[in-house]
Image (cartoon, rainbow, N blue to C red):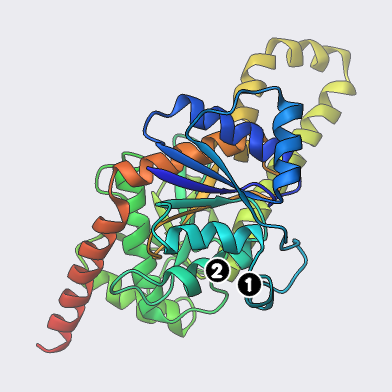
Amino acid sequence: MRVAVDAAGGDFAPQEIVSGALRAAAEFPLIGRMYLVGPASRIREAVRQSGMRVPDKVEFVDAPEVVDMGEAPAAAVRRKKDSSIVRAVDLVREGTADAVFSAGNTGAMVAAATLRLGRLDGISRPAIATVIPAPGKPFVLIDAGANTDCEALWLAEFAVMGNVYAREILGVDNPRIGLVSVGGEESKGNQATRAAFTMLEKSTLNFTGNVEAGDMFGGKVDVAVCDGFVGNVILKTSESVAESVSGLLKEAVSDNPLAMLGGVLLKGAFSRIRRRCDPAAYGGAPLLGVKGVCIIGHGASRADAVYNALRVVRDVEVHRVNQRIVEEIRELKERIEGQDNE
C-alpha cells in the first residue's frame, strides 16, 4: 500500500506529523511506500529534529503552499494547486498513492478529495465517519461534518457506509443503525429524516429507528446517522463535555482531603477513561464515499494520533471497505426502487 501524508497540515505540523508518519512507516509492513508532502525544507528540518531514521520506503514531495485552517475550503483548493493537501490528494488521483492522510483544513480535504478523486459508484455525497467513545463500546457517528444540509437519500447512503465501517473496522456483527432525531417516534424529525426513516425501514440494515443523545451514549446503537451540521455539533460537544467533566473531577478532588485520597486510589481508572476519550486513540476519521482511501485527522493531532490514523488507513485498505460500500449501496438502491415499483 502506498500512502500520501500531508506533512504540513495541522496545528503541530510538520514536526508531529513527520514523527508519527515515520513511526508508522517503520512499523507497518503493509505500507510499501510513503510520501511526505509539504515544503521540503520544513520536512527535512522536522526529520532532523526528530532524530528518527528515514526508511527507504519514505519519499519527500515538495509542496511549497499550505492551506491554512481559516481559509475558505473550495476557494483554497482551486487557488493553491501546489498546497500540501492538493498535492497529496493528487498523488492518489494519479495512481502514485492508494491513500491520503491530512490533519489540515477539514473542508479543504473534503473538497479536494471529492473534486479530484470523485465519488464511488452509487454515492451521492461522501461523509465523515468518526468513532465516538461510550460506555461499553464506541459507536460510529456519520456524517461528522462533510455535508451541512442533506437529502433523505444521502442519509440512507450514510447508514450503509457507517454499517460497513462498524462491521469491517470495529468488528461489530450486524451493527444497529439509528437515525439521529429529536424523538424516538417515526413522526419526529425534519422532512429529510422522516423520508430517510422510510427508506431505512425498507433496507436490510439492522435499523432500530430514531435515536436521541441518551441512546447513542447509552449503548443502544452502533452507528448514529445524521447530517454533517448535527454530527459536527455532537462531536465537538462530546469532546468539550469530556474535558469539562475532567475539570470538574479535578476541582472536586482538590477541594477535599478525603476526596484526594479517593482520587489517588482511582488514579488508574481515571487514566483508562482519559485514554478511551482521547481522540488520538482513534487516530483519524475516514471520508467514506470517495475513490481511494482518505483519512482526516484532528487538527490538534500529535505523533501518536498520526500513527493511529495511518493504522486506520491500513485497516480500511485491508478490509476492502470501498468495495463493500459500492456493493451494499447498489443493494440498498435496488431494494428501495423495487419496493417503490410494487
Residue 338 on image: x %, y %: 12, 82
Residue 29 on image: x %, y %: 39, 28
Q: Earlier in the sequence, mark 1 or mark 2?
A: 1
Q: In this view, does 141 lie to the left or right of 173?
A: right
Quarter in which the N terminus is drawn: top left
How dense is the environment of label 2, judged by Cα within 10 Å: few (below 14), some, or many (20 and up)? many
C-alpha gap between disc 1 and disc 2:
6 Å
Q: In this view, does 176 lie to the left or right of 27?
A: left
Q: Residue under circle 2?
A: 112
Q: Residue at x 34, y 46 (%)?
A: 317
Dot 2 falls on a residue whose secondary structure is helix
Residue 168 seen: yes
Q: In this view, does 160 lie to the left or right of 295?
A: left
Dot 1 falls on a residue whose secondary structure is helix
Quarter in which the C terminus is drawn: bottom left
Q: Which residue lies furthest to the left in this view?
A: 342
Identify which residue, 31 or 106, lies in the foreground: 31
Q: In this view, does 10 lie above or below 57?
A: below
Residue 240 on image: x %, y %: 72, 48
- Residue 50 falls in image quadrant: top right
- Residue 269 falls in image quadrant: top right
Identify which residue, 88 or 203, lies in the foreground: 88
Q: Is residue 85 left or right of residue 182?
A: right
Q: Residue under circle 1?
A: 77
Q: Residue at x 57, y 75 (%)?
A: 148
User: The disc labelled 1 sits on which kind of residue?
Assistant: Val
Residue 153 on image: x %, y %: 35, 78
User: The disc labelled 2 sits on which kind of residue?
Assistant: Ala
Q: Is residue 265 above or below residue 157?
A: above
- Labelled pair 1, 2 in contact (Cβ < 8 Å): yes
Residue 215 seen: no
